[in-house]
């Protein structure tokens, strides 16, 4: 059975209504809906609307706070620490990146540490906020254990993603967005929704055995072995430990999973080092030279980070967003909970 296709604007309006009914202020619900549907538009379905039902369950349980008291704990001209009070990720992270950009405009760099936030969605959304204003953008997030450290067969690290984006001129920004695991955790959820197996090297089962069964895979595996494992560890040191909100060791000692995240967003003023237009032209020239290299067998193009997502966005903006059967049922359940009409096509 082919996936259902829904226009992005219809899906976003529906998702906003769902979160408003769940108790979020309209402006916060709009941010949450935009970030989720943006991920779907770019083909990052693992971080899109399939998350809605779990978010609603987390709001109901108190793990996510629909009306958080977000406050700045400490601030300097270049650095800030923001306590997020279990806010839904985008609600805290979008204004945090705006703050980082304003800092960078004033002093050349903005570095914002977020503590006690919840799932932030596709991290490239935030790094691209900076790139579109002519800055280099960075976004990192860390959570409780879900990935086996290199050499272990039990979860001890989080597969902490990092997104970095830089602006170009004629070309789209270069946008790297990667987890430190072989596959992002949301891709396991997506495989369950689609009813397809996992990649051979994606996950371990609860006993630490490799598995391709999407319903048994619970422990992610690090990308590049010690490389992904090492990055994940360092990211925790830069975020969770620096925020005084450790998320790994307490859980590994048998404590309750806090179901929270800590993260970093940063913006760097490129014009401090080089004329911005010159820099953008240099990025364009670099991409041109890379794309002119001889193609490996089976490749028609040499794609830059972020380019596959941009190609998908161009297609889905016209054809609609495909919704797998499992995700469609989650959205129908959300509509039933609040007595909402479903978006056209669902």
Image (spheres, rainbow, N blue to C red):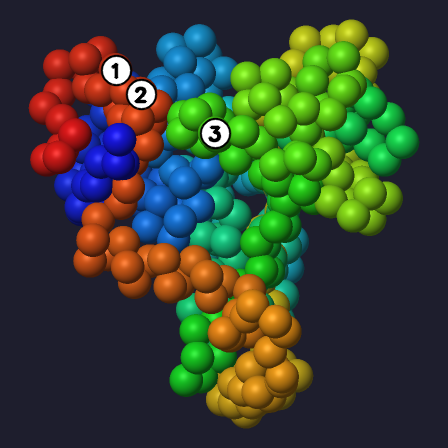
| Helix, strand or loop status at disc 1 | helix
Q: Residue furthest right?
A: 151
Give the residue at x 42% y 20%.
Answer: 54
The residue pinned by badge 2 equals: 330
Vertical placement of 39 versus 299: above or below? above
C-alpha separation, residue under disc 1 versus residue under disc 3: 22 Å
Q: Could you tell me residue 5's position as x and y percent?
A: 21, 41
Which numbered disc flags the more N-terminal residue, 3 or 2? 3
Relative depth, front residue between 80 and 50? 50
Q: Tell whether label 2 touches label 1 (CB within 8 Å).
A: yes
- Whether residue 66 sits left or right of residue 16 in the image: it is right
Q: Could you tell me residue 170's position as x and y percent?
A: 41, 84
Question: Which image quadrant: the C terminus?
Answer: top left
Of the two numbered discs 1 and 3 in the rendering, the one whose residue sits closer to the viewer: 3
C-alpha separation, residue under disc 1 versus residue under disc 2: 5 Å
Vertical placement of 24 versus 235: above or below? above
The residue pinned by badge 1 equals: 333
The residue pinned by badge 3 equals: 196
Q: Could you tell me residue 202's position as x and y percent?
A: 66, 35
Give the residue at x 27% y 36%.
Answer: 3
Q: Could you tell me residue 275's position as x and y percent?
A: 56, 89
- For mark 2, does the 10 Å Cα neighbourhood hold few (<14), some (14 to 19), or many (20 or more) residues? some
Number of numbered tags placed on the structure image = 3
- For mark 3, does the 10 Å Cα neighbourhood hold few (<14), some (14 to 19), or many (20 or more) residues? few
């Amino acid at each position: 059975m082919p996936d259902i296709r829904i226009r992005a604007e219809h899906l976003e309006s529906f998702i906003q209504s769902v979160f408003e009914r769940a108790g979020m202020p309209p402006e916060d619900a709009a941010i949450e809906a935009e970030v989720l549907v943006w991920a779907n538009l770019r083909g990052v379905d693992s971080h899109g609307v399939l998350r809605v039902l779990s978010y609603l369950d987390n709001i109901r349980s108190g793990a996510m706070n629909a009306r958080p008291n977000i406050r700045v704990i400490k601030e300097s001209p270049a650095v800030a620490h923001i306590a997020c009070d279990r806010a839904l990720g985008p609600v805290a992270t979008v204004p945090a990146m705006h703050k980082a950009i304003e800092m960078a405009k004033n002093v050349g760099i903005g570095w914002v540490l977020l503590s006690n936030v919840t799932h932030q969605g596709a991290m490239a959304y935030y790094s691209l906020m900076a790139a579109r204003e002519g800055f280099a953008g960075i976004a990192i997030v860390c959570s409780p254990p879900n990935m086996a450290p290199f050499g272990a067969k039990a979860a001890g690290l989080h597969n902490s993603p990092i997104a970095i984006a830089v602006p170009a001129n004629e070309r789209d920004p270069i946008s790297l967005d990667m987890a430190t695991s072989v596959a992002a955790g949301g891709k396991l959820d997506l495989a369950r929704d689609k009813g397809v197996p996992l990649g051979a090297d994606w996950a371990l089962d609860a006993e630490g055995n490799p598995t391709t069964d999407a319903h048994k895979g619970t422990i992610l595996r690090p990308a590049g072995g010690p490389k992904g494992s090492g990055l994940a560890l360092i990211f925790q040191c830069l975020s969770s430990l620096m925020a005084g909100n450790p998320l790994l060791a307490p859980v590994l000692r048998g404590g309750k999973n806090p179901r929270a995240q800590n993260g970093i967003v940063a913006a760097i003023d490129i014009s401090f080092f080089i004329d911005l237009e010159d820099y953008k032209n240099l990025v364009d020239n670099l991409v041109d030279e890379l794309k002119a290299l001889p193609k490996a067998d089976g490749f028609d193009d040499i794609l830059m980070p972020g380019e596959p997502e941009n190609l998908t966005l161009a297609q889905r903006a016209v054809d609609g967003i495909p919704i797998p059967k499992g995700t469609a049922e989650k959205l129908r359940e959300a509509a039933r909970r609040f007595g909402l009409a479903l978006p056209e096509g669902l």
